[in-house]
């Protein structure tokens, strides 16, 4: 190209500055169309300098024969096409990485909201991430203890696992997410939390900040807040930035990192909006056809790597629109993740917090994180017996609806008592209450002992003796 | 009209009267004792209830106090942290100002004309011979041609160098 003899060279060395384009053809909604560009690629990060000196950012959505379509992160309101300078940075978004993120509160683009300087790092990483070589993956093992009985006892979270929480509008999933983020530990090993809130209201964002203040002050938390009124494309970056920060803290810093991402349904809706702006062919419920692989590109960034310390555990929260578990977002999430924690309206109506539907919840990797040498020898047996008894109690409740309570046998009535005791004695806890695993398992035993010994066949006799299980029934 | 009782009847009924009186007295005693017991039980229950209410109130008060103390602690910690972060930001901005000022001071250096010529030649090389070159406000040059622009101003150089700063910037506030 005669007119730009050294552009390629210049744009590869940022010391000399990069060529800026002033050829903005038009601005439409969140999109800017720039003509006469060369060497620009998809997903490249863009910096806009306005006439006032204000800086905005964007991502390249489309490039065709010298014309680039860029989605402006902060929207195009107030931008004058004749006075915009556009700088293509030559690569997808990169962010500084390192422990400087700990204790910081940032927006969805990683810019400080806490009044501090920018976050510095010894190096930078592309937010798109590098997939872990499958051969170098180490299976998840050992628990992350959340201090929440319903999770620790029955759906133990395992380091390196991805375990989503399925909720519905109006249920206290944000409270649960904040409680887990505030209380979780990894058995005394270095631990921290990266909390990515996407599409939350300002009130919810404040709630999360307050709830996690202590952890933040202890330098064990990175908080990303993308509020509902922030641009949608920023929402697509937020989980990627969070995971990039988490990977560095885990695999270089040697920490066990819990990444809480809420609300993934807001994320998927943002993806749908951007996909529509790109003119892509919509698939189920107008979500893009690549929703599955896009969600997988986030969830699959968790794990442990051979020869490296630390782990990344992912806890995504998603609200099921109209409580529909077959909606594309929970449906596709369920294909990728290793189990789920389901919150239910029925349990919520009983006044139980957290309203976990124990029979619909499952941690597929629980056996790798609980039991002898990991939590307590009797943990898996107790969990299995609790679930078996709950299933029986549900059958009996259905039977009682048909034949009436008075027609039930005394043992059946004990199962109904067990059901009550399970929700009010074990699951229900205060929103600021941290229960140790010992406390959780002792409560589990107390709940189980509402049943006669003959009904506790999944528990070894010596344990029943030790806990004074009574005969009869 | 009552018939007069035969003589001696009064004496004959004396034991009956006495017995009736004893029974009545015993009944009255039993009722009194029951009433006493009832009163004692009611009193004890009331006392227990009062104690429970007091305990609950005390517990509630302690919980409220703890919540208030925690909230105050959170506020204080957040305020302290905000001040610390604001001070760090001031340091960073001051560093930025000084770096820009020092780079702009190159304008008065003896070698500046050569530097200016090199920058001009570079801009011309990159954007072609038709480029329109102007002086950058803080020294250096800016080239513009048909929708493209290259900022080789000294301020821009300083800003770019600052953007590349890594963790060494944290030396400003950490020991």
Image (tube, rainbow, N blue to C red):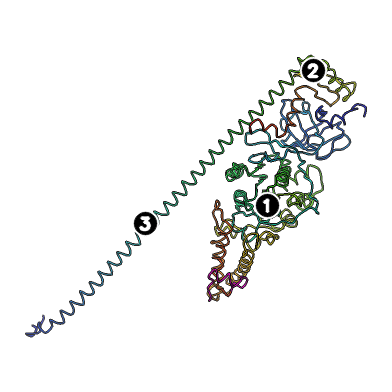
Quadrant of the drawing holding the N terminus of chain A: top right
Examine the rendered structure and indicate whether residue A421 appears above or below residue B139: below
Examine the rendered structure and indicate whether residue A383 appears above or below residue B127: below
Number of numbered discs on residues = 3
Disc 2: which residue: B135
Q: Which mark is residue A40?
A: none
Disc 1: which residue: A315
For marks 2 and 3, the one nearer the N-term is: 3
Mark 1 belongs to chain: A
Disc 3: which residue: B50
Q: For numbered disc 1, what is the local secondary structure?
A: strand
Residue A224 in the image, given as x and y percentages of width and height? 66, 42
Is there one chain holding both mark 2 and mark 1? no
Q: Main secondary structure of the magenta part?
A: loop
Examine the rendered structure and indicate whether residue A139 appears above or below residue A23: below
Q: Please state the extent of the stretch shown in magenta in the rendering.
A: A455-473
């Amino acid at each position: 190209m005669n007119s730009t003899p050294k552009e390629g060279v210049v744009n590869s060395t940022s010391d000399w500055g990069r060529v800026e384009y002033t050829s903005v053809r038009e601005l439409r909604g969140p999109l800017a169309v720039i003509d006469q560009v060369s060497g620009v690629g998809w997903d490249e990060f863009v910096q806009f300098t306005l006439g006032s000196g204000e800086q905005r950012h964007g991502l390249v959505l489309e490039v065709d024969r010298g014309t680039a379509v860029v989605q402006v992160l902060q929207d195009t309101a107030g931008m004058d096409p004749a006075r915009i300078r556009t700088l293509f940075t030559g690569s997808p978004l990169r962010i500084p990485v390192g422990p400087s993120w700990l204790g910081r509160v940032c927006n969805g683009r990683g810019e400080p909201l806490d009044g501090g300087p920018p976050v510095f790092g010894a190096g930078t990483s592309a937010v798109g991430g590098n997939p872990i070589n499958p051969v170098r993956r180490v299976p998840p093992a050992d628990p992350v203890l959340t201090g929440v009985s319903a999770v620790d006892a029955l759906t133990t979270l395992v380091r390196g696992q991805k375990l989503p929480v399925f909720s519905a509008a109006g249920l206290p999933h944000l409270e649960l997410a904040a409680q887990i983020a505030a209380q979780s530990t990894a058995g005394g090993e270095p631990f921290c939390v990266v909390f990515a809130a996407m599409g939350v209201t300002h009130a919810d964002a404040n709630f999360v900040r307050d709830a996690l203040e202590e952890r933040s002050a202890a330098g064990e938390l990175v908080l990303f807040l993308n509020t509902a009124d922030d641009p949608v494309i920023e929402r697509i970056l937020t989980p990627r930035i969070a995971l990039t920060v988490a990977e560095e803290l885990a695999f270089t810093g040697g920490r066990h990192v819990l990444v809480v991402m809420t609300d993934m349904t807001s994320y998927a809706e943002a993806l749908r909006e951007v996909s529509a702006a790109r003119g892509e062919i919509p698939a189920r419920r107008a979500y893009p056809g690549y929703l599955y692989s896009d969600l997988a590109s986030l969830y699959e960034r968790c794990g442990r790597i051979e020869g490296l310390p630390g782990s990344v555990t992912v806890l995504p929260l998603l609200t099921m629109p109209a409580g529909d578990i077959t909606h594309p977002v929970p449906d596709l999430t369920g294909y990728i993740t290793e189990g789920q924690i389901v919150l239910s309206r029925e349990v919520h109506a009983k006044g139980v917090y957290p309203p976990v539907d124990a029979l619909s919840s499952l941690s597929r990797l629980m056996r790798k994180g609980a039991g002898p040498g990991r939590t307590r020898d009797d943990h898996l047996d107790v969990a299995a017996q609790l679930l078996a008894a709950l299933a029986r109690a549900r059958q009996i409740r259905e039977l009682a609806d048909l034949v009436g309570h008075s027609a039930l046998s005394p043992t059946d009535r004990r199962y109904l008592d067990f059901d009550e005791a399970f929700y009010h004695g074990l699951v229900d806890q205060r929103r600021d209450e941290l229960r140790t695993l010992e406390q959780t398992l002792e409560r589990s035993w107390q709940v189980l002992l509402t049943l006669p010994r003959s009904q506790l066949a999944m528990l070894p006799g010596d344990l029943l003796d030790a806990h004074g299980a009574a005969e009869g029934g | 009209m009552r018939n007069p009782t035969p003589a001696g009847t009064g004496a004959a009924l004396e034991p009956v009267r006495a017995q009736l009186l004893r029974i009545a007295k015993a009944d009255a005693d039993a009722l009194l004792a029951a009433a006493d017991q009832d009163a004692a039980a009611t009193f004890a229950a009331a006392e227990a209830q009062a104690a429970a209410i007091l305990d609950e109130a005390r517990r509630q008060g302690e919980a409220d106090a703890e919540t208030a103390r925690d909230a105050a602690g959170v506020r204080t910690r957040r305020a302290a942290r905000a001040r610390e972060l604001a001070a760090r930001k001031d340091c960073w901005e001051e560093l930025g100002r000084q770096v820009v000022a020092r780079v702009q001071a190159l304008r008065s250096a003896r070698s500046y004309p050569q530097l200016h010529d090199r920058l001009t030649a570079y801009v011309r090389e990159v954007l072609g011979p038709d480029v329109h070159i102007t002086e950058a406000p803080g020294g250096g040059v800016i080239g513009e041609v048909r929708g493209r622009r290259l900022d080789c101003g000294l301020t821009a150089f300083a800003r770019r160098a600052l953007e590349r700063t890594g963790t060494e910037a944290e030396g400003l506030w950490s020991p």
